[in-house]
Amino acid sequence: MASVFLLSPASCSGLRAHMILRPGAASLLARRLREPLGAPLGEVYTFLSGLYFRGKLAYARAFADRPEHVLVITPTAGLRPPDTLVTLDVLRGFARVDIADGSARFRRPLLADARTLAAGLGADDEVILLGSIASPKYVDVLTNVFGDRLLFPCDFVGRGDMSRGGLLLRCVRSRQELSYVPVRGAVRNGRRPPKLEPLRGAALPGDGR
């Protein structure tokens, strides 16, 4: 049995996005995005989202069977590996699409890639969504394709983004994978769990902080 991890996207229209999208942005990442080659999607989303996406990416890479079993949901390009190179123009295109409004520009490529992924899954393979299930923005598309094979960490319920990111990083450090339940029929909101203990010790391998 293999697990494929789908990571929810980071906002491309917030304050941190403005820091790299604005003309003349001088950070190293902004300069790389203006170059023809661009920068890896996972690195860009980690900058935009901070702890939450860093946790999702580290967790997926730690527990996926193969690197190709880690995919990121994008606003206009469906499912893409985190090493996919994106440029400033691509990122600006992402920023113009609000995935919450059900735009066809978002849903169509996501639906096509989800169907392709589903066609290649084995009978016992699972799809793990690392993202919010509280709104239907991408959950409806993915549930319609994967059905009860679309799972999510039950410990996400009641947690905010920062808490989820911290939880995932702790799981990577302890090498303890979370328990998953089907998205379909799950309780989407719940009581906030106790705060996590502060992270201590050395950075994760490959952590760019």
Image (cartoon, grey):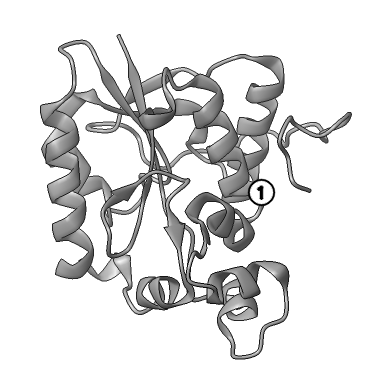
Q: Residue furthest bottom?
A: 23
Q: Is residue 162 left or right of residue 35?
A: right
Q: Is residue 141 visible?
A: yes
Can you tell which quarter of the image residue 28 is in?
Answer: bottom right
| Residue ranking furthest to the front | 36
Along the viewing direction, whichever of 90 and 144 lies nearer the viewer: 90
Q: Identify the residue shown where x is 19% and y is 25%.
A: 148
Q: Give the residue at x 13% y 49%.
A: 112
Residue at 59 percent across and 63 percent down: it is: 48
- In the image, is 209 to the left or to the right of 86? right
Quadrant assignment, res 135: bottom left
Q: Badge 1, how many Cα within 10 Å: few under 14, some, many 20+?
A: some
- Vertical side of 182 occupied by 157: above or below: below
| Residue nearest the viewer, comparing 156 with 202 | 202
> Please, what secondary structure does the residue beneath circle 1 have?
helix
Q: Is residue 16 left or right of residue 111?
A: right
**Place of residue 98 in the rendered image (x, y in percent of width and height, measured from the top left):** 33, 72
Q: Which residue is disc 1 drawn over? A: 51
Amino acid type indicated by mark 1:
Leu
